Amino acid sequence: MKNTALSHIHESLGAKMVPFAGYNMPVQYEGVSAEHETVRNGIGVFDVSHMGEFILSGPNALALIQKVTSNDASVLTVGRAQYSCLPNETGGIVDDLIVYKLEEEQYLLVVNASNIEKDWNWIASHNDLGVDMRNLSENYSLLAIQGPKSVEAMQTLTSIDLSTIKYYHFEVADFAGIENVIISATGYTGSGGFEIYCKNDEVEHIWKKVFEVGASFGIKPIGLAARDTLRLEMGFCLYGNDINDTTSPLEAGLGWITKFTKEFTNSENLKKQKEEGVTKKLVGFELLERGIPRHDYQIVDAEGSNIGIVTSGTMAPTVGKGIGMGYVKTEFASEGSEIFIQIRNNKVKAKVVKLPFYKK
């Protein structure tokens, strides 16, 4: 089990540690609901240093990214980031990722921790363009400082105006006395904030400074369990649950990051799928009766016939009800459709709702 550069700090703070994607990670500190509400209403910090970081450089870096990702990276300017995915040859998804344009011929790709080796090998296998690829995953740490108080609380740590960094934009600047830190207005919570990329030997210093300046704002460390409930309230996909090697980006509602203005892996087949229509769709649903939906629970119709499967589910702390996401047959995918979640021996009534569940 690998440790992040901050694992010893999480343990000293009494975090419950669990194995996750090969790393020893904090799943919770004081409890999921309390940590969830800290981020929704104030400011919390996640150590997500297990994520993977690849640097692609050279005159053909963009061409390689365009070939392996579904979104159109040609629209990126320096200082902008983009959500995208890596389609496979069979209609599924290798991984979802964020692409950052660092310089004119240099890009940062941030991938899921459990897929680092898989993604690296996939991209490398398509690199017949001489692109310089560097896997920096073992050398870099990542803090997600999330919540509505993030800008105000963190402003004293940098010389740049944090309030001017738009969503999915970033700056490379000084932060907590460290130069050349990536300060990115991205995150997985829907409550605003920043993601801070720095070297492993810098992150403990940054963590301490962040908690010093955040103390008067009620800052707290947050575990991966609350990260999951926060992202689910926003309807954000989790790789391995809501998307995987067998789910198409179109089935997953990711048509908005699937751009047919260029050719990419399996684009012809995906374009055909778009024209013909999909047979199942990823939807959000909320329970109309008591119960908590869980991953892999069956979704059935009024007669009890199987129509799909739950991919993510929880009792949502802010929304205050059982919510989930799952794939259903297309005829049950429209907003307001009545569906049932099979929870043990009970058919629990639910309805399909428009995402996100949490609306500010």
Image: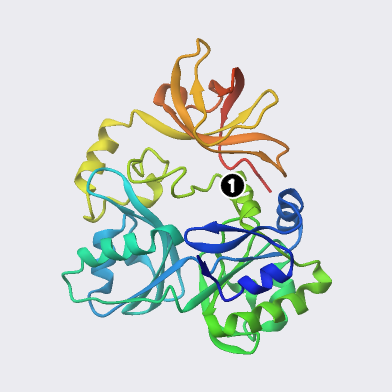
Disc 1 residue type (three-letter): Met
**How far across and down, in percent of the image, does residue 259 sit?**
31, 52
**Which percent across, then down, holds residue 267?**
23, 48
Q: Residue at (65%, 57%) from the top-left corner?
A: 191
Q: Nearer the viewer, residue 37 or 193?
A: 37
Judged from the image, the secondary structure of the residue bearing numbered disc 1 is loop
Residue at x-position 70% and y-position 80% = 208
Q: Answer above or below: position of 97 versus 142.
A: above
Q: Residue at x 62, y 31 (%)?
A: 286
Q: Which residue is outermost to the front?
A: 1
Residue identifier under label 1 = 234
User: Does 98 sit above or below residue 305?
Assistant: below
In this image, 309 relative to 319: left or right? left
Single out the residue that lies furthest toward the left. 128
Residue 182 shows in this picture = no
* Quarter assignment of residue 203: bottom right
In front of the other: 145 or 59: 145
Number of numbered labels in the structure image:
1
Residue drawn at 46 percent across, 79 percent down:
139
Residue 59, percent from left and from top = 23, 79
Question: Residue 217 in the image: x percent, y percent?
Answer: 80, 69
